[in-house]
Amino acid sequence: MNNNHIIHDVGIAWQVGSYSDAIEVGAGHRWLYISGTPGLSKGGHMPDNIKEQTELAWENILNLLNSAGMEVEDIVKITQYLTRTEDIPEYSKTRKGYLGDVKPSSTLLITPQLGWDNMLVEVEVIAAKK
């Protein structure tokens, strides 16, 4: 986690997953709000499995962070949408590969459908950097 961010831990998050209960960002930070990002390639290809869609979504997010001069460590909040409960373990494993030890605040929602019929995952990110 970015050294300018303060993690507030009340002991709930670590029991559920790999995220923080709350993150405080001090004054003077630049904020980046990344829209819901699906597992879609620049050429318009969307794989039919959760692992590949998750990889594409996170690659797109990393590219957006990079374009703003930010890194994974600057992420303070993630909202994730999946269409199938059974995809949670694979999604979580793949996400961990991109986040490493970074544990932003996080929300995971299961929804019956996203923007396209074959869309299995969509990820929103908020990042802050001094």
Image (cartoon, rainbow, N blue to C red):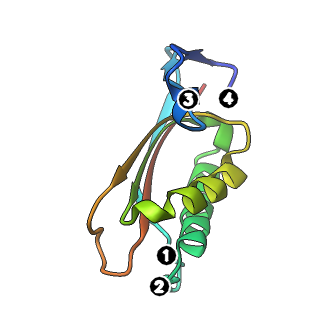
- Reading the image, the residue beneath label 1 is 40
Residue in front for this viewpoint, 2 or 51: 51
Q: Position of residue 55 (x, y in %)?
A: 62, 67
- Mark 4 element type: loop
Question: Which amino acid, by three-letter code, is at mark 3?
Answer: Gln
**Among numbered discs 2 and 3, the one appearing first in the sequence:** 3
Residue 71 visible in this rendered orientation of the protein = no
Question: Which amino acid, by three-letter code, is at mark 1?
Answer: Leu
- Mark 1 element type: loop
Q: Are marks 1 and 2 in contact (CB under 8 Å)?
A: yes
Question: Which amino acid, by three-letter code, is at mark 2?
Answer: Gly
- Mark 2 element type: loop
**Among numbered discs 1 and 3, the one appearing first in the sequence:** 3
Count residues near mark 4 (Cα–Cα under 10 Å), then give few for <14, some for 14-19, many for 20+.
Answer: some
Residue 98 is left or right of residue 36, and the answer is right
- Reading the image, the residue beneath label 3 is 15
Which of label 2 and label 3 is nearer to you? 3
- Reading the image, the residue beneath label 2 is 44
Which of label 4 and label 3 is nearer to you? 3
| 114 in relation to 24, above or below | below
